[in-house]
Image (spheres, rainbow, N blue to C red):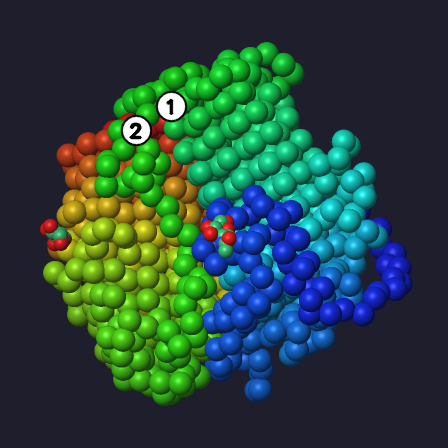
Amino acid sequence: MNLLSANLFLFVLGIQGIQFEPSTVGHVVSEIKDRYSAYIDFKGTADHSAAISANETEAQILPRQAAYWYESIAHQGISAFGPSGYAVYRNVKDYGATGNGVTDDTAAINAAISAGGRCGRGCSSTTTTPAVIYFPAGTYLISSSIVDYYFTQLIGNPNSPPVLKATSSFSGFGLIDGDPYYTSNLNWGSTNVFFRQVRNFVFDLTSIPATSQATGIHWPTAQATSLQNIVFQMSSAAGTQHTGLFCESGSAGFMTDITFNGGIVGASIGNQQFTMRNLIFNNCVTAISQLWDWGWVYQGISINNCQKGIDISAGGSSAQNVGSVTLIDSSITNTPIGIIASYTSSSSPATAGSLIIENVVLTNVPTAIQLTGGSTILAGTSGSMTIAGWGQGHKYTPSGPTQFQGIITPNSRPASLLSGSKYYVQSKPQYNTLPVSSFQSVRSGGAAGNGVHDDTFALQQVINNAAAAGAVVYFDAGTYLVTSTLFIPAGSKIVGEGYAVIMSSGSYFNNMASPQPVVRVGNAGDTGQVQWSDMIVSTQGAQAGAVLIEWNLNTSGTPSGMWDVHTRIGGFVGSNLQYAQCPSGSQNTGTCIGAYMSMHITPSAAGLYMENNWLWTADHDIDDPSNRQLTIFSGRGLLIESTAGTFWLVGTAVEHHTLYQYQFANTKNIYAGFIQTETPYYQPAPSAPYPFTSISTLNDPVFPTSCQTSTPCANAWGLRILSSSNILIYGAGLYSFFDNYSTTCSNNPGPENCQSAIASVEGSVSQVHVYCLSTVGTTDMLLRSGSVVAVYSDNNNVYPDTIALYTA
Ligand SMILES: *[C@@H]1O[C@H](CO)[C@@H](O)[C@H](O)[C@H]1NC(C)=O
Ligand SMILES: *[C@@H]1O[C@H](CO)[C@@H](O)[C@H](O)[C@H]1NC(C)=O
Ligand SMILES: *[C@@H]1O[C@H](CO)[C@@H](O)[C@H](O)[C@H]1NC(C)=O
């Protein structure tokens, strides 16, 4: 599909001069109040305990707005490896933006983003110029796109989300353009756009004539990215041409707490995979138009008063573009057609359009699912009904393939994972009701964050003091080098600025025979809660014994949480694991073993909610202008061996670890969706587990020694489940694109032989269920106790191969 026509929007430029009246503070406040009565749907959707009530006076509103802690805290964040004097934090008002709703703030906002030699046009990617662009409350009039540079967070005041208000003559591809078409190509390769956020905004398109094409945000994006707490306000007039979210490509990603009001399409989206949660669509012509995908999870979607709900019919029955979709815990109301699909028993590719629906309430939806062209696949109702379980595609229950379309038995959901009938969810806390005095800065506490100074002692002191005082630890932007384990006790709340980095270094972490955690959360037997968000854990140089995150904490009651916390092993300045040290194919086992394991959830741990986490061993150098590929060894990805279980993995990805990406062993009660993996590009040269060995006490997989001489075999597992129960996976993409850096083994539609098998269920299990399992580059999609369950050639999809339903 050619999506380049999208860039035509760009060339419709022509900004006119507009006269503005002078502003007053009173004008701004009354505007904020007006806005809040206009965007009433916004209230209550998310982290809004301090939102404005219609009956509040200006005197009540203003002090509270000023009190948002992040606006008033001392801004001491740095880029450890960036230009000298480089500013991470930028308040748009310091760059001349007024937020008064009448002056054109476009140039000022773009200046705040681009200042300081950042990664803009023509730059492939970088970690050295991160920026947080902060928007105080106000209405920011814009006449052309705000261009979101690489490694940028755009953050509004969550207590009174700023409005980005397009002028009537607005031109540009998105009020925010996340990846411009300066040429016929996107400026940044969409699958390499990492480490960005946009949160707490209202996008107001309503001054743009309804009949003009307009887009709220253009968002081609990859892992470690998020949109949160956003309203798209579009015209609901007949013939409206407004679209809220437009995404044509990428390998993402996560977004949550977004309201789309009006428009021809709320979200028009294509990407390899995504997890989208708590999206509300009101009065859109079509709520969601799925351009293409491999796999997708929609969780907690609410579609109200639209003409069509979710359209996954792209390409039609003979050439479908949508691989698979999983829709759960959602509702569709007062909408004539719930879902439009192209899948039939003879549609093509064979498993494209795979769909699983679980716990979806329809109210006044006369047609639940319609086949493109008109016939009804599943009748709806003018009253109310709940789709407990429904699906289409190929199933293996446990053997197959069996083509199916119709009712399925939904998962039996463990009570410990639920809130009401739905899976428990919790958005990333922004601590917006806390005063700035509740935060303790690590730099104020003596940590340097410059990537050189040993910050272990200073960090530990701040963390201990904050936990004792009930305060939040604030990691100012920076890279904090540690030479021994950092301990996070129960009761800690930790939040980073601009993805502050904890980076291990030195001999303590470089003994493969004696692995050590870089960050240890609780000790075995500890109970309590920890919240941690917006940070990265990394290693520097050879760290063959580094376990980047070890989670021991046993949480009952409100779960612990880890939001937008990532591991990043190599591929950035300061890591000493870049192209100069570890070029692709180099096999430097002396200097390029970057980690022992990314994250270990130990037997004593329980009750952790993980959202939008990317555990990444670098396959390429982000700071190399040509993004050249790397060979970095890291033993294991995410290991969960909690005996009590109770984990939520909402929008997680684990990539390029040597033995496996996800391993669940002797555990239970896990919700996981969407999970995404990639096998190391170098394998099988050398084969797994080299340069590591299989450790039986960790339940490591054992690889046949014969693989050292015959290929393809002995590659990392994407997903391995051992002797576990209630492992409920809602969407998985397990990808093996390379064989010794060549992609000929994964070029659809075959031969799909980069590796022989990628997922394995072993031992005695109960209720191990997988919805919409997609694989790339593997001959066998799934093994059960060593026997082949499914082969790729039976399950061909748009690019991957897909099983809609597997029950072990
Ligand atoms: C303002 O409105 C809220 C509900 O929106 C109500 O709980 C509160 O009592 C009202 N306050 C006053 C002073 O009327
Ligand atoms: C976790 O804590 C709960 C209650 O505090 C306790 O009942 C349970 O045994 C603990 N689990 C583990 C694995 O220690
Ligand atoms: C891997 O590829 C490199 C470069 O093409 C080649 O020299 C090497 O022999 C290959 N290794 C194996 C085991 O195929």
Secondary structure under badge 2? Answer: loop
Which kind of residue does numbered mark 2 sit on? Asn
Q: Quadrant of the C terminus?
A: top left
- Left or right for 338, reference 402: right
C-alpha span from label 1 to label 2 = 8 Å
Residue drawn at x 48%, y 47% is 44
The reply to whether dot 1 and dot 2 touch (C-beta < 8 Å) is: yes
User: Does the numbered disc 1 mark a residue whose Cβ is under 8 Å from ligand 2?
Assistant: no
Vertical placement of residue 514 versus 37, above or below:
below
Q: Say the numbered circle drawn on residue 411.
A: 2
Q: Where residue 746 sits: x, y (%)?
A: 49, 41
| Disc 2: residue Cβ within 8 A of ligand 2's nearest atom | no
Secondary element type, mark 1: strand
The residue drawn where x is 87% and y is 62% is: 18
State the quadrant of the N terminus: top right
Q: Residue at x 28, y 56 (%)?
A: 560
Q: Which residue is the site of mark 1? A: 389
**Residue 807, quarter of the rendered image:** top left
Residue 194 location, x and y as percent?
52, 59
- Where is residue 213? Give x, y as percent: 77, 42
Would you call the spot at circle 2 few (<14 residues within 10 Å), some (14-19), or many (20 or more)?
some
Q: Is residue 754 above or below residue 772?
A: below
Horizontal side of residue 432 vs 483, given as left or right: right
Front residue (pair 440, 36): 36
Number of residues whose C-alpha sits closer than 10 Å to that of mark 1, classed few (under 14), some (14–19) or many (20 or more): some
From the viewer's perspective, is 523 left or right of 78? left
Is 113 on the left-hand or right-hand side of 629? right
In this rendering, does residue 569 appear at all? no
The residue under label 1 is which amino acid type?
Gly
Looking at the image, residue 406 lies above or below residue 593: above
